[in-house]
Amino acid sequence: MTAPKKLFIKTYGCQMNVYDSERMAESLGGQGYVATDTPDDADMILLNTCHIRERAAEKIYSELGRYKVLKAANPDLRIGVAGCVAQAEGAEIMRRQPIVDLVVGPQSYHRLPELEAKARSGKRALDTDFPTEDKFEVLRQRPKSKRGPTAFLTVQEGCDKFCAFCVVPYTRGAEMSRPANRVLEEARNLVERGVREITLLGQNVNAYHGAGEGGDWSLARLIWALNDVDGLERIRFTTSHPNDMADDLIEAHADCPKLMPYLHLPVQSGSDRILKRMNRAHTADSYLRLIDRLRAARPDIIMSGDFIVGFPEETETDFQATLDLIDAVGYGSAYTFKYSTRPGTPAAERPQVDEAVKDERLQRLQALVARQQRATQDSMIGRDVTVLFERAGRQPGQMVGKSEYLHAVHVTGADLSPGRLARVRITESSTNSLAGTVFPSDDAV
Ligand code: SAH
Ligand code: SF4
Ligand code: F3S
C-alpha cells in the first residue's frame, strides 16, 4: 500500500468556501489524500480564495510567493488555486505564478480528481467553466466520519441581483437551489455523524426555491422539514437579502422551535440615494419595516448586518443616514467594509470617494457598531440562555459554546462535552464573549 498523500487546504472568504473546502477534501480523499494542517509537508496545497475585496485577492499572490521555497525543495508538490479568485482571474494566476499547477473555479470542484491527475502528470490544469452537470450530485458522498456539533450546508448558490459593487454574480454564477430531498439527506447524514446545529448557506439563501414534493419549496418550507429531523437541535441560515424575506420565513421565526433567534440581514447603506446607485432594490424604510415585522414575530431576535462605507459618490449626508439607520435598528453585530473597487462591476467606473474620507467614516461606523454590540452583550447579563458546547476553552476546565443568539459563551468547571446543550445563566460580558454558570438542577436539555 502506498503512503497517503498529504493535502493542505487554506480557506479564505465566506462560509460557502468553508463548505466547499470540506467537499474538496472529501473528493481528494478518494484520490488517496489525507488532510494535514501545515503546508510544509504537503503533497498538495490548495488555496480556496475570495475575490470580494481587492485586499482579499492580493493576499493570494503573496501567499503563493511564500510557497516557492517549498516547491523548490519538493518538485512533487502540487499547488492549486480554487474559489472566487480562481474563477475571476484563473489564466492571470497561471501567468503570474508559474508554481501554480491547478486552477479550479467554484462550479468545477467535482472535476478535481481529473484535474489533480493531470497536474500529477506534469501538465498544468485550468477549469473555470460553469458546467451543465450538477457538482453537488457528483460530489454526493455519504461520509461516516465523526464531526463536531456544528456544520454548514450549502442549499443555494450564485446570485442574480447584481449589486453595483459586487463580484459574486460573476464568480459564483447564476442563482440555483439544490433539491429539498438532497438537502434533507445531507442533513440526516450530518446528524448521524454528531452534528446538532446546521447553518444553511447561500449567497442569497432566502431566495431558495429548490424542487421538492408538490413543487418548489421556499426556504421556510425547507426549515420546517429540517425541524422534523430527530437529533438536529438548531437551524440557522445565512446570508439573506431583504427583498427575499418572505412572509412564511418571518412566520417561521415566530413558530419554528429549532430556528434560532438571530438573523444576518445586510443592508449596506442607510441612504436611499446610495441604495439606488448600489442597485439594491430596497429602501432604508422598507428595511426598517421588515425589521419591525421580524421583531413582532420574534421579539428577542438579534440582528446583524453588512455595511459599505465610501461607495462612489457617498456624501457625508448619505453616511449620516447609514449611522441613523444603525441607531434605529440596534445591531447585535455588524460587518463593516470600506468600498473596494472591483474591476468589471458597474461601480468601479464611477467617481470614487477619497481614501482618507473612507477611513474616517469607517472608524465612526465601527465605533457605533462596537457600542451596539457591547450593549447587546451586556443586556444578556442575568439572562438564561441555552448553549451548544463546541470545544474546550483556553483556561483549564473551560468549555466554549454558542447561545441561541450566536454569542460565544464560556463556562468553567461543569461536566460538558462537545455537542451538549445546557441552560446557562449569564454572569459576565467581555469584548467578544459572555461567561456564565450552568444551572445545577436543569443542566440537561
Ligand atoms: N450575498 C450577501 C453578501 C455577499 S458579500 C448579500 O447580498 O448581502 C459579503 C459582504 O461583502 C457584502 O454584504 C458587502 O457588505 C461586502 N462587499 C461586497 N462587495 C464589496 C466591495 N466591492 N467593497 C466592499 N465591500 C464589499
Ligand atoms: Fe453580491 Fe448583492 Fe448578490 Fe449579495 S445580493 S451576493 S451583495 S450581488
Ligand atoms: Fe468571497 Fe466568493 Fe464568498 S468572493 S465572499 S469567497 S462567494
Image (cartoon, rainbow, N blue to C red):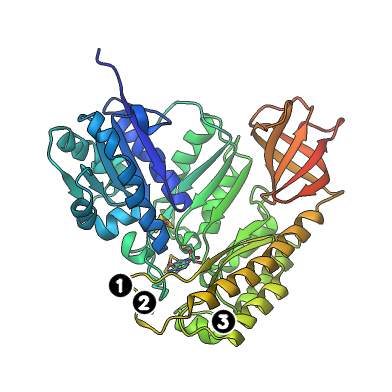
Residue drawn 15% across the image and 43% down it: 124
Residue drawn 50% across the image and 26% down it: 146
Q: In what quadrant of the picture does the C terminus appear?
A: top right
Q: Which amino acid does label 1 sit on?
A: Gly
Residue 91 drawn above or below residue 438: below
Looking at the image, which is closer to me, 438 or 34?
34
- Indicate the position of residue 330 as horizontal and vertical percent values: 72, 68
Q: Which numbered disc covers residue 348?
A: 2
Residue identifier under label 3:
283
Residue identifier under label 1:
344
Can residue 173 be seen in this snapshot?
A: no
Q: Which amino acid does label 3 sit on?
A: Thr
Q: Is residue 311 left or right of residue 119?
A: right
Label 1: element kind: loop
- Indicate the position of residue 20 as horizontal and vertical percent values: 39, 45
The Cα atoms of the two marked residues, 1 and 2, are separated by 7 Å
The Cα atoms of the two marked residues, 1 and 3, are separated by 25 Å
Label 2: element kind: helix
Q: Is residue 275 left or right of residue 168?
A: right
Which comes sooner in the sequence, label 3 or label 2?
A: 3
From the image, state whether disc 3 or disc 2 is nearer to you: 2
Residue drawn 70% across the image and 71% down it: 329
The Cα atoms of the two marked residues, 3 and 2, are separated by 22 Å
Q: Label 2 crowding class (10 Å Cα cut-off): few <14, some 14-19, many 20+?
A: some
Q: Is residue 308 left or right of residue 425?
A: left
Label 3: element kind: loop
- Indicate the position of residue 121 as horizontal and vertical percent values: 13, 33
Q: What residue type is labelled 2?
A: Ala
Asked if labels 2 and 1 touch by Cβ distance under 8 angstroms, the answer is: yes
